[in-house]
Amino acid sequence: MRIQAGLAFEQAPPFTLPLRFFLTAPLFLFAAGVQLVLTPEALASRWAPQTLALTHLITLGFLGMTMLGALTQMLPVVAGTPIRAPRAVAWFTYVPFTLGGSALVLGFLGAGPLAFMTALLLLGGGLAVFAAAAAASLARAAHSDTVNGMRLALAGLVLTACLGIALAMPRAGWAELPPMWAHVDAHAALGLLGWVLLLVIGIAYQVVPMFQLTPPYPPWLRRGLAVTMAILLALHAAAPALHPAVAVFVQAGLAAAVLGFALATLHLQVRRRRKLADVTLDFWRIGMASLAGCVALWFAAQLWPAWAAHPAYPLLLGVLFLLGFAISVVCGMLYKIVPFLAWFHLQAQLQARAGSIPTMKDMIDPRHQRWQWRLHVAACGLLALAVFRPAATPLAGATLALSAAALWLNLFQAVRRFRAHGGVAGQQRPAMRME
């Protein structure tokens, strides 16, 4: 395959560093599916403990793991500034993040203050290590649209974590604070839009043209979208101090920015150079359609206050954003990034001739990817139905668990083929530079 110019592949970290994040993430998604089977009341209310546990299994567990793994890989290659002591940073992020995220979920499910104390210490420590290392790397990086998106997303992660710690402290018994629903809303908005969406936008500038063979995003969008969203999110966090009309204007601006990114991406995909069927493209299309659906739901809530007050509204919005958009896009990226890394490291380590190692497409059987896509689509539909018909929740959870298991098996298939052809996942860096 043609390697995109301007990427410092000779600085790529060992395959094993991002891989451990990528292979752990589907296990959290599998746990989310199992939880839905065991606790169908998780979709009864936005504020139910089971709902909070489910939300954090998806956001911290699945999305957090994959995005930390993606940054571990992309900071050296895209930003051109490797993380110092990458093995130590990866371990001191991965282990606390895995254990702390699990403790937080158990705390929501009734394990008590000790679980929240453990989660606060582990998650706070692990995220502090990663944020400090990533910030030092980004501070040395040259200016680019993707790097700017990463910087803003990292700031969103730090603010989300700070608010999350403040909200969890009373549950750990460390402070007696009254309920702060505005802070909860700010925590959710910063986490979903300031961390997840801004990072997806920044990475999309690089991976959509590279892997989907589309034209690049328009310069005006690359330069202005992420910054505009960051400013609007800052204003949104200050919503209680704003005039109600100003707050609605800020929300409308965020909705327009979100819709603009979704439509721009779909437009680029229509103009892609190769029209062959590609399951990763289908994942992205579902993601962008779901993102547009979130905007439509928000708009409907502005027109009909009764719908805005309905308990199903925030739950359906969450299903569309987390399952329909975020998980879909992440699955699409994983099916490109993991096979590419397996092929690239194998090629670089062995200095192999063309035809002597699997191609990128051969790393994961396309039929297996398609089956996981079908399970994912079914899970999204069933979860949307379960918001209104709780009896569908166990079936939706079982389908989500099957989709997560299929995703893990598919990613591990690439690892097995990498090893079967002599690849060493822990090698410090590729043996050659690839232009």
Image (cartoon, grey):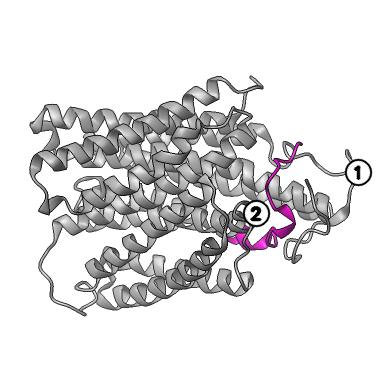
Report the residue at 13% width, 76% height from top.
176
* Quarter containing the N terminus: top right
Name the residue tied to disc 2.
Answer: 77
Give coordinates of residue 130: x percent, y percent: 49, 68
What secondary structure is the stretch in magenta mostly built from? loop
Q: Is residue 91 left or right of residue 344?
A: left
- Name the residue rendered at 75%, 49% in the picture: 344
Residue 353, label in figure: 1
- The residues tagged by marks 1 and 2 sit, at their Cα atoms, a distance apart of 24 Å
Residue 2 is inside the magenta segment:
yes
Q: Secondary structure at mark 1?
A: loop
| Residue 94 on image: x %, y % | 52, 68
Q: Is residue 230 visible?
A: yes
Question: On the image, which quarter does residue 263 sit in?
Answer: top left
Q: Amino acid at mark 2?
A: Val
Looking at the rendering, in which quadrant would you find the C terminus?
A: top right
- Nearest the viewer among 202 and 275 is 202
**Camera-side mark, 1 or 2:** 2
* Residue 56, percent from left and from top: 35, 57
Disc nearer the start of the sequence (1/2): 2
Q: Secondary structure at mark 2?
A: helix
- Disc 1 marks which amino acid? Arg
Observer able to see residue 402: no
Circle 1: is it few (<14), some (14-19), or many (20+) Cα within 10 Å? few
Estimate the x, y position of residue 16 in percent, counting from the top left.
Answer: 67, 62
Q: In terms of image quadrants, where is residue 407?
A: top right
Quadrant position of residue 365: top right
